[in-house]
Image (tube, coloured by chain):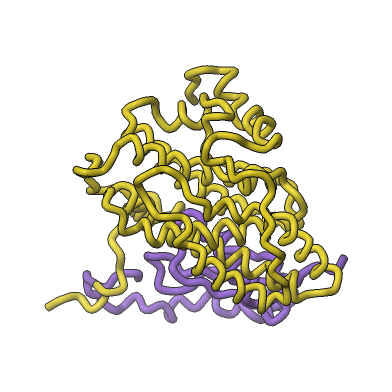
Amino acid sequence: MNEWPLYEVFLRGKRGLNHVHVGSLHAADDDMALHNARDLYTRRNEGVSIWVVRSNAITASSPDEKDPFFAPSGDKVYRHPTFYKIPEDVPHI
Amino acid sequence: MSNAYDAIIEENDHTRWAFGTGFDDPLAGVDPTVPDGMDAADLAAYCLMLGDDALIMSHRLSEWCTNAPELEDEVALANIALDLLGQARLLLSRAAQASGEGDEDALAYLRDEHEFRNVHLVELPRGDFAHEIARLLVFSTWRLALLERLADSPDPVLAAISAKGVKEVTYHREYAAGWAMRLGDGTDYSHERMAAGIEAVWPYTAELFSPHDVSVGVDPQSLRTEFDTVIAQVFDAARLNTPAATAVGEPAGRSGRHTEAMGVLLAEMQSVARAHPGATW
């Protein structure tokens, strides 16, 4: 039997401003993926918006390139915006 | 000055954020007194019918756990079963409240076969996946039409339960219709299996619309037109034919006479509660 393609699921929760990756699932097409995501990942009132995307549509960074990709940013503390004052009523920061 | 971010923040119990928050109680603020002019015994009998439909359908759907063709659909069917179990709990509680006898557990677990008032459709033994989709399509199409009308019931509790149920059963119908179209309009083989499922459950649809002698609620016959319209749309998209209207036996579930499958179902469903009376955990 052919297996249904894999999809990645992203949810935006009631409190969240952005969609967060929550897991993956199998579905025959996009519409079924959305329904399956609703059934698998929003059963406990977690979400108010769902994105699904075919896993093979995602281009990922390779673990082999970890050092050239990420190591150079590890020692540049001056890039952090620690010198700004954040107003007290700005949430999610 | 108002905070520009207020509109996108929902206040909730943040300590339980990982499980989702902001759960609603469907009966919050609803007056449980039986309204003047409504026969309490009839209200109890009516809630029992609809509660038993939901309870037995829920049990049959729960039998798909570990048996569904795909993991995703197993969870989907279990979700639908749990929605219906929730409706059954509220309806049986209302029945107990209106009759002044027992509670939801006594009604679910300590009644005998002849005291159950569900239609035969929901007690039929589990068939294949297409058979279950056919049953769910018929059941949820009928029940949605019913609950939509009951959301205006003079009994505020029944109205609140129905309004909650409308949102749930709308999804159940969408799920069943989606699969009926996928299978019916799929391969020759899936079409054959879906058509066989429809053929098998169709004789049990007549009972859904047969009149009963309870003065509360909606006249079952008034639901037929909406049911036929929705089913015709789905069948058209699914390349399925409406079988000839043949009914099997008498529509006797509402008067407590059931098919042979019912006793076996109850024996399993009630076994724990009967083996350990009053147990809690």
Q: Eyeballing the image, is A52 above or below B122?
A: below
- Residue in the picture at 35% in, 55% down: B22
Which quarter of the figure has residue A53? bottom right
Which quarter of the figure has residue B199? bottom right
Identify the hue of chain A: purple
Q: Is residue B72 left or right of residue A90?
A: right
Q: Position of residue B20 (x, y in %)?
A: 43, 55
Image quadrant where one finds the N terminus of chain B: bottom left
Q: Eyeballing the image, is B237 above or below B33?
A: below
Please state the total of marks drawn on the protein image.
Answer: 0
Q: Position of residue B163 (x, y in %)?
A: 37, 58
Between residue B218 and residue A12, name the one nearer to us.
B218
Q: Position of residue A26 (x, y in %)?
A: 71, 66
Between residue A46 and residue A33, name the one nearer to us.
A33
Q: Position of residue B89 (x, y in %)?
A: 44, 40
- Residue in the picture at 34% in, 58% down: B151
Among the chains pictured, the one given yellow colouring is B
Is residue A67 among what the camera can see? Answer: no
Q: Eyeballing the image, is B78 above or below B266?
A: below
Is residue B183 among what the camera can see? Answer: yes
- Residue in the picture at 28% in, 48% down: B155
- Residue in the picture at 72% in, 46% down: B126
Between residue B258 and residue B187, name the one nearer to us.
B258
Q: Is residue B70 left or right of residue B155?
A: right
